[in-house]
């Protein structure tokens, strides 16, 4: 942050706040369920109407698959024809990572214009990656000289499979739409030079990058490689001590990313000098303030490096602001903005039932353990002293072994469930012995009421788990066998019914 402190006084860099408009206001979002079609969005024109798509996505509605594929195809045809390095004029707004935050993308588009350059990382992490990319593609098709899209490291098969975008595509559309997106991502340009002054690129420099023109020699229409020039410009970061290096070194291994390099102030300074440029504008790293302005060569010159990050409240957990950078009339204007309200999705686009399975399994398992605890070895030993209870003990042992078998079966099932969600059989609760087949749980009730004087309370299943669990107080009901009273629920039952916040938090991360 120290680099940003005082930068507001910079002659060439101005920082202001952009008020995020209340996108939702008091309105709540209700998807209509209607899917937009090609005739509706394209009409008689050769290009789509992006506003229709925007308002449709705003209510979480979707496109007809043919329309989605058409947008992806049409955009990639335009992108394919663009060079690796775009040459762009001044008066342009540059946005950093968006990461599936569609409702914040709408804010970005309100901050400036009409020219926009996006530095990549449109998808993954946030829940609206497909909306971001389809809307940006619609803008690219309808006004290709106003909207420019560069590739980020997340625009790859490797990362979208590992993170959320592939699953999002399959849940909201299909694998064909995902594959089409991947092929379109291969066509995205790699860099841009604004006004022959600033190199704009997703991540930064590479030891293999001597001249900007080296980028034009790359064959870019492919998956991002795990090393080399194309990898570095989409993966590298400045060294943490950028501008304060103790020795003039250029590159070091990028340990945080596990690939590519960290570049130093000296690497940037030399690169800019060799290419007669003034600065580098890049995204790729979350910033508390939405941007980071690095060291200038002289007090009155442009910063050598600026990071821009345009996903506010990143992942819904970082408390970061976002920013866009406008460059016009020789001045850099950074506009910070806060996050917009957005609809909620469960992690990994799961439905509520699938998402709940592990918690239900865990709690039911605890409840069964409580049931088992009424038959401790000590109790059995004590009962053994009285011969008149011997038969009851035998019954208990039999019940205990039945319960152990049920328990083993249940734990086996849980293991399968945890490793292979969703497991629809769980909903049927097949593995519990039913009353008709086996009077197991009825027996527990009888035995507890008659014999378990020491037990303060027992948990007895009378019909089916978990809805009909009853907690019975045997000390109160021992005079009237079989007419047990319901008393305060056990801790496990409370946790099961209300959800144990601590456990849930731990499992969700
Ligand atoms: Mn990135």
Image: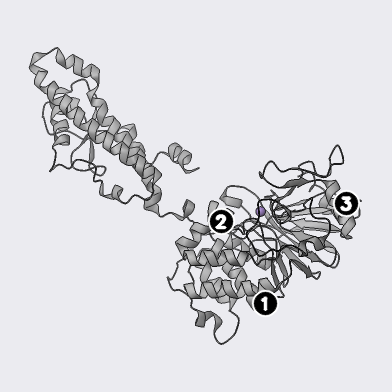
> Label 1 vs label 2: CA separation?
27 Å
Residue 31, image x and y in percent?
45, 68
Out of 156 and 268, give the one closest to the viewer.
Answer: 156
- The relative height of residue 16 versus residue 448 in the rendered view (above or below) is below
Out of 448 and 298, give the one closest to the viewer.
Answer: 298
Q: Quadrant of residue 51?
A: bottom right
Q: Quadrant of residue 196?
A: bottom right
As helix, strand or loop, the secondary structure at mark 3 comes to helix
Residue 423: tell me if it is visible: yes
* Residue bearing mark 2: 160
Residue at image point 16% right, 16% down: 383
Residue 65, image x and y in percent?
48, 72
* Contact check, label 1 and label 2, Cβ < 8 Å: no
Query: Looking at mark 3, is its residue's CB closer than 8 Å to ligand 1?
Result: no
Residue 6, image x and y in percent?
82, 48
* Contact check, label 1 and label 3, Cβ < 8 Å: no
Question: Which of pointers 1 and 3 lies earlier in the amino acid sequence?
Answer: 1
As helix, strand or loop, the secondary structure at mark 1 comes to loop
* Residue bearing mark 1: 143
Label 2: how many Cα within 10 Å (few below 14, some 14–19, many 20+): many
């Amino acid at each position: 942050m120290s680099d940003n402190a005082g930068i507001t006084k910079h002659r060439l860099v101005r920082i202001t706040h952009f008020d995020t408009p209340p996108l939702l206001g008091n309105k709540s979002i209700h998807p209509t369920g209607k899917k937009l079609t090609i005739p509706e969005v394209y009409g008689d024109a050769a290009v789509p109407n992006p506003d229709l798509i925007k308002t449709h996505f705003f209510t979480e509605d979707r496109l007809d698959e043919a329309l989605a594929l058409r947008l992806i195809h049409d955009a990639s045809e335009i992108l394919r024809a663009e060079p690796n390095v775009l040459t762009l004029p001044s008066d342009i707004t540059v946005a950093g990572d968006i990461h599936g935050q569609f409702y914040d993308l709408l804010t970005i588009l309100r901050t400036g214009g009409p020219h926009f350059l996006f530095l990549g990382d449109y998808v993954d992490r946030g829940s609206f990656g497909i909306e971001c990319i389809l809307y940006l593609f619609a803008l690219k098709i309808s006004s290709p000289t106003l909207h420019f899209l560069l590739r980020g490291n997340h625009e790859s098969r490797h990362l979208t499979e590992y993170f959320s975008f592939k699953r999002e595509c399959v849940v909201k559309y299909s694998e064909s739409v995902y594959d089409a997106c991947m092929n379109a991502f291969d066509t995205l340009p790699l860099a841009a030079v604004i006004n022959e002054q600033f190199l704009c690129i997703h991540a930064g420099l590479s030891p293999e990058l001597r001249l900007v023109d080296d980028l034009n020699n790359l064959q870019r229409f492919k998956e991002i490689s795990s090393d080399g020039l194309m990898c570095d410009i989409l993966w590298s970061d400045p060294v943490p001590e950028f501008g304060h290096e103790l020795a003039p070194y250029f590159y070091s291994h990028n340990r945080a990313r596990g690939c590519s390099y960290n570049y130093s102030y000296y690497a940037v300074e030399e690169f800019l000098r060799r290419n007669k440029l003034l600065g580098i504008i890049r995204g790729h790293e979350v910033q508390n303030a939405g941007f980071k302005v690095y060291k200038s060569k002289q007090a009155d010159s442009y910063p050598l490096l600026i990071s821009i990050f345009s996903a506010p409240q990143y992942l819904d957990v970082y408390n970061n602001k976002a920013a866009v950078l406008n460059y016009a009339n020789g001045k850099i204007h950074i506009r910070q903005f806060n996050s917009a309200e957005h609809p909620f999705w469960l992690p990994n686009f799961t439905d509520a039932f699938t998402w709940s399975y592990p918690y239900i399994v865990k709690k039911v398992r605890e409840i069964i353990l409580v049931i088992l605890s009424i038959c401790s070895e000590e109790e059995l030993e004590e009962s053994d002293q009285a011969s008149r209870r011997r038969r009851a003990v035998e019954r208990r042992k039999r019940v205990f072994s039945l319960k152990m078998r049920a328990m083993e079966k249940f734990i086996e099932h849980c293991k399968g469930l945890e490793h292979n969600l969703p497991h629809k059989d769980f909903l049927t609760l097949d593995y519990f012995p039913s009353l008709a087949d086996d009077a197991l749980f009825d027996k527990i009730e009888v035995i507890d009421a008659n014999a378990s004087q020491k037990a303060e309370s027992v948990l007895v299943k009378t019909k089916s788990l978990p809805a009909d669990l009853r907690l019975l107080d045997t000390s109160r009901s021992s005079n009237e066998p079989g007419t047990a009273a319901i008393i305060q629920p056990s801790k496990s039952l409370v946790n099961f019914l209300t959800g144990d916040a601590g456990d849930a938090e731990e499992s969700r991360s």
